[in-house]
Amino acid sequence: MVPVLLISFIPLVRGIYIGFTDYELGGQISFSGLENYRIMLQDRFFWRSMGVGFLWTTVVTALQISLGLILALLLNQGLRWTSLYSVLMLVPWAMPPIVRGLMWRQIYSPDTGALNLILTQMGLIDAPINWLTSFEWAIPAIIVAGVWGEIPKAALFFLAGLKTIPGSLYEAAELDGASAFRQFRHITLPMMKPIMAAVVSLSFMWNFNAFGLIWILTQGGPGGLTRLPMLAAYEEAFRYGYVGYAAAIGNVMVIIISLFLFFYLRVQLKERTS
Amino acid sequence: MQRLISWILYYKGFIIAGLLAVLIISVYIAGEMAIRLESDEIQTGPLRFLSLAWQEEAVAVVQEITQDWNQAHPEQQVELIQGTWNAVHDYLITGFETGDIPDIFHYESAVIVDFALRGYLADLAPYISDEMRDDILDVNWASVTRPTGAVMGIPFLAESSIILYNLDLINEAGVIAPTNEDPWTWDDLHIAAKKLTKDRDGDGVIDQWGTAMGLRNSANILMNQSIAFGGSFFYYDEQGDIEVRVSKPEKELIGNLARMLFVDKTMSPSGVGKSGAEMIPGFLAGNYAMVVGIGSWARQQVVENAAEGFNWAVMPPLKAVTQNMGVNTQTLSIPRSCKRTAIAMEFIQFLLSSENTTRLAASDWMLPTRQSSLEDPRLQADSTGWKVVTANAQFLSTGPWVGLPGYIEWKSRVANPIFQEFFSQRISLDEAAERIESESNSVLARYQVRGLKW
């Protein structure tokens, strides 16, 4: 309890408080009420970062869930070497976001990156593309890197969920002549619903808070196109010195994340009660 | 006894809460005491010096000079901390706010202006020797001196923009390179770039570009180059209020680059998403005949990485109305919270003596700020471009943005993103100009409201 208070609760409360002050680097802290939030309403840089944040979070979460589920279904088929695949699958997730970022930056490099090399040799592009600084490609590029690292986590959760579905249900369905798709739709999906809700909520929270990977890949560029909310808060505090305003952005993020946490807890509670 | 136990059980909630409170307060007090003890040690232990030298040779020179100091001053040692340009900003900001900050730190004039406005820096003016004051060029002092005369850092290296060129390709195309006495105009550059842009293997794709320029974060270079066209982006009105304008001179500069990129197609489009440093491999591979607007430090990368027999040289700045360019200096500063400013400044004077400044400039391949170093024969070699680089000192000039509150935010939030959009052909020059003007004023207004003054 005491470590939780010291490490989590006190900084959280202080952070929330700073979001209601006009604290700037080098200056004094004084309470400013809702002034930061009034500024936020008119700050197009903030709204733009929220827009990018929701786009990134939605697409990455959706792809993680779908691809994670496909991967889990494949691993649940009782193939040979399943244990080995399961361990290998965890490698991307085990890598810290910074390392993942460095790896993808190298892959995307216009001069020495593997992606340009492969595409050029296949004749799909004439000249190397600067994926991370191109206005057309920067968002897809970070999404691919984000999804790649997080699929294993979703797959692992889903695999655990699939293992809990009684085989007798599938056997009965087969006897009734249900196709594989119908079995998936009427047995797998409903049985996986609680775990899916949990994975969606948690992934949304993690992705909405993404920082390290994007910072290494694009630093929010080009032209602020990939400036996620966490990057925006970081820049406000460390680049421009508006600590109070940065904390206010953090507070708004906490509220958004709390909504998903509430959704997650509700599903968990429902599952336990049933 | 039983009464005591039942009393404890009755009030257990309050007792636990009380114990927790005592524990938390104890941890807090212990932490404060530890910080105080550490802070006492900081005030009596070695001076901490954060260096950002990164080229191998430069790191070695800084280490040698620090060792020399430590040998000569056993009573006041200096501990060298090796920092990196990527992480220094966060490191210093955190340090300023927590009080755990090195006594001397290396950074650049454009950023220490912001630190000075926040009250983080000590005024070094009273500690500067006459010899140092007279030897460092006025234009370099101007980058760190407030109108009150307070000096926020000692400038020791100046960033100077150069044009690197491939001597063999230029000779092969029959182009005569400019000299300090007979510099090129932008039109000369256009003509040469056309001659040097070639499809060498005849596959219909250009594989040798006349010019290349790292345009990813181009605000700095465009600001500095605009001075040669008589522009500056920032203009003061009669009341002393600042206004951002993209007028004819600024548009002329940007238009020249756009012409090479989009009309003549003599500038490699790959530079749009790259930094200056990222253009060097292409230059060494013969993909670019000239690299425009790169820092003089890039010569070191060329010397270190070029294949044997790769012939290259440096051109003097292009002439528009003038050859002038804005200056940004590398500096050494002392935080206001430092309790040993005088001795820290003694170390800076030692580190930045004329001889040491020459060594630092030579090892970092940058322009020294001292006149005596500029004249040093070690910085006059023709083969590595030093002669042209040191001659650039005469063209250095102070832009009106020096000391402008909010300049750093303006550059990263407004200028760089809009220039990125322009060079990616998402907006026209007129749109870019209009957006820079309208968005700048809202960013700068935040600082004007706060009444910050350089």
Image: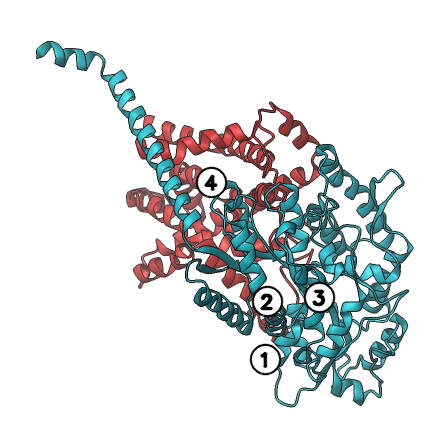
SS under mark 2? loop
Disc 2 to disc 1, how far (Cα)? Answer: 22 Å
Q: CA distance from mark 4 to mark 2?
A: 32 Å
Can you say whether A189 is above or below B233 in the image? above
Q: Which chain is red?
A: A
Q: Is residue B296 left or right of residue B427?
A: left
- Residue type, label 2: Ser
Q: Which residue is mark 3?
A: B214
Task: Residue under label 4, please give it.
Answer: A200
- According to the image, label 2 marks what residue? A109
Chain letter, disc 4 residue: A
Mark 4: few/some/many CA within 10 Å (<14, 14-19, 20+) = many
Query: Residue B367 in the image: x percent, y percent?
Result: 69, 69
Q: Disc count in the image?
A: 4
User: Which of pointers 1 and 3 indicates the residue nearer the eye?
Assistant: 1
Which label sits in the foreground, 2 or 1? 1
Q: Nearer the viewer, mark 4 or mark 1?
A: 1
Q: Amino acid at mark 3?
A: Gly
Name the outermost residue toward the front.
Answer: B130
Numbered disc in front, either 2 or 3 = 3
Residue on which the image places disc 1: B304
Is label 4 or label 2 in front? 2
Q: Residues within 10 Å of mark 3 (few under 14, many from 20)?
A: many
Three-letter amino acid code of the residue under disc 1: Glu
The numbered mark at residue A182 is none
Residue A27 visible in the shown view: yes
- Disc 2 versus disc 3: distance between alpha carbons? 15 Å
